[in-house]
Amino acid sequence: MARPNKVKTSKYREKIDNWIIEGKGDTEIIELLKQQDPPEKIGRTTLYNYRKNDFNINKEATREYHEKKSKERLNGAVAQTVSDLEFLDNIITVANDTGLEVDPEKNISELDIKKLGIQAVRAKQEVFKAGSEDEKEFIITIVGVDSDEEDNVEVEPEAEEEHQPD
């Protein structure tokens, strides 16, 4: 097993870290270590390796920055998906509303509105299917569609159907 970097075991490690934070170069830190009581000798390569591998401020700051930005993007996407699900809920409610107004002049039939409701249910179902394992169980109520129109896309009225993951 490899020896730990000498800086990591140095009694002056905290000072070395602070000197690095202050922007002191390796040569300057080596000279400051020689002036300590008792002096400590750490080589340039050892100090360089410590700065590069164990106390790399820029590397850690970059990693943390990217994680923070990724989390912000994830939170934004989650908020948008929740908003989309709420919008689908509203479409489903409107499609089920008994006071729907059919407008033959605009070619909006009862069947069109109910199809929209079914499409919203299916879209919502797809979002839930893609969720985490413990969130895949959900209940969907399918609204029966009956229409006298020629476009016969009928869905039998069903009671609440519980979906279980495969």
Image (cartoon, grey):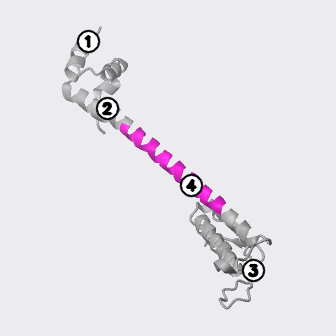
Question: Which quarter of the image is occupied by the C terminus?
Answer: bottom right
Instruction: Residue type at mark 3: give it.
Output: Gly
Residue 108 visible? The answer is no
Residue 152 point in image, percent of width and height: 67, 89
Q: Give the mark nearest the N terminus, 3 or 2.
A: 2
Image position of 113 with respect to 127: above or below: below
Q: Nearest the camera: 71 or 54?
A: 71
- Give how far apart the Cα atoms at labels 4 and 2 are: 48 Å
Q: Quadrant of residue 19?
A: top left
| Range of magenta residues | 62-87
For label 1, the SS is loop
Closer to the chain start, of discs 1 and 2, is 2
- Which residue matches tag 2? 4
**Mark 4 vs mark 1: which is more N-terminal?**
1
Q: Secondary structure at mark 2?
A: loop
Amino acid type of the residue that numbered disc 1 sits on in the rendered structure? Pro
Structural distance between the alpha carbons of marks 3 and 2: 71 Å
> Residue sitting at 54 percent across and 48 percent down?
75
What is the crowding at mark 4: few (fewer than 14 residues within 10 Å), some, or many (at least 20)? few
Q: CA distance from mark 4 to mark 3?
A: 29 Å
Residue 33 lies left or right of residue 63; in this view the side is left
Q: Residues within 10 Å of mark 3 (few under 14, many from 20)?
A: some
Q: Nearer the viewer, mark 1 or mark 3?
A: 3
Disc on res. 144: 3
**Outermost residue, front direction?**
105
> What secondary structure is found at the residue carrying circle 3?
loop
| Residue carrying label 4 | 80
